[in-house]
Image (tube, grey):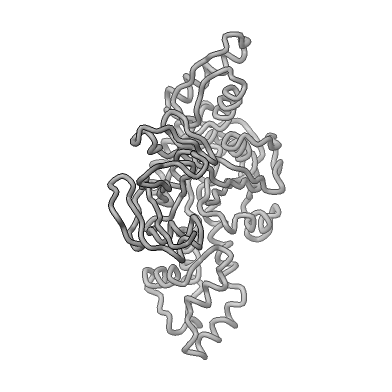
Amino acid sequence: MLIGIVGKPSTGKSTFFKAATLINVEIASYPFTTIKPNHGTGFVRVECVDKEFNKQCNPRTGYCEKGIRYVPVEIIDVAGLVPGAYEGKGLGNQFLNDLNRADVLIHVIDISGSANEKGELDKPGSYDPANDVRFLEIELDMWYLGVLKKGWNKLSRKMNQDKEVQISEQLAIQLDVFGVKPELIDDVLEELKIPKLDPTKWTEEQLKQIATELRKRTKPILIACNKIDIPGAHENYERLKKEFPNYYFKPCSAESELALREAAKKTWIKYNPGDAVFEIINKDMNEKQIKGLEFIKKNVLEKYKTTGVQTTLDDSVFDFLKYIAIFPGGIKGLGDKNGNILPDVFLMKPGSTVMDFANKIHTDLAKGLLYAYDVRTKMKIKGEYRLKNRDVIEIVSSAK
């Protein structure tokens, strides 16, 4: 699972990344602070199953707080993209290639309108953030089109001359860098009503349609409307929701989330990522620190019930990708050989089966799979059984 953080310079991408991972990265209000991509671990939230069994879990990775399991995911923050990135402007090709294997993208925009198209800062309201929503999709679609068209004439002639060559398989090889599979290409061609028989007759517009649809399905985009606490930002946020009714917009203040997480790390406050409230536990903070926390409480948490960082991460995995969380367990006990209770939870693609789950744990388990148990019901289930979110599953295998 890889979540990509994208957007133009100076929108707060790196602040979002740092707030999600607490990794110390360079943050500055000028373009191209980030050149090499930042990699780190963030978390998505799942309601833990331990209380259903009257147990306390012991996570091997991540952690559990107040019945909420924080499951690790990989996050990458790439350098800011500018218009023409797919043509190489602003080192755009390099930065786009950093996103090849991302499963989903979070597009961080400056909803206050204080950063122009190049990421140069001005006064709030001086720029229309709707332009950024349009520009990023164009860049990504043209990026896909460029890869699709590499050697296209030679490839299409080959497919036309040899009727045994499957177009979906050939295109999947060409687009493997994006994780595109032949069956996905078949679905897209059928949906767009583009005939497979003679690809040499495909028009430029049809190629663009194919590239765009494949990009939407392999790089879905959520939009984090950052700097929501700046005057005028909320009005822009409401306007963009009406202007782009089919898009996902989340009000966000990455600076607020970072401030809360750092304050919690210093034990000044009690706060868990994604919470709508925090509790001050250190009464010795100075006046500036207290005022800063009061500002966040009034202008962000009370208004939006979240800073937007954690909820956007959660939604990217569970609402957009439709992943499910599966807990390994046993009908005779939930502990591993070391006595750790429910130490693991796995994020699985929608439609995953017991066999897929066994493969995820270890290929040998899958090879020797006999059956499995639904630990809640203690019912025996087969390898083709489709899993549901928060299932607790015991794998029974001949493998030792």
Viewer-proximal residue among 333 and 389: 333
Q: Residue placed at 61% from the left, 30% from the top? A: 123
Viewer-proximal residue among 285 and 199: 285
Asked if 292 appears above or below 17 in the picture, the reply is: above
Q: Quadrant of residue 23?
A: top right
Q: Residue placed at 55% from the left, 66% from the top? A: 145
**x, y percentage for residue 79?**
66, 47
Residue 164 placement, left or right of 82: left
Q: Residue placed at 46% from the left, 84% from the top? A: 198
Residue 87 placement, left or right of 361: right
Asked if 160 appears above or below 260 in the picture, the reply is: below
**x, y percentage for residue 95?**
66, 54
**x, y percentage for residue 304?**
43, 28
**x, y percentage for residue 392?**
37, 46
Asked if 270 appears above or below 399 in the picture, the reply is: above
Label tally: 0
Residue 351 placement, left or right of 314: left
Viewer-proximal residue among 36 and 113: 36
Asked if 349 appears above or below 245 in the picture, the reply is: below
Q: Residue placed at 33% from the left, 58% from the top? A: 386
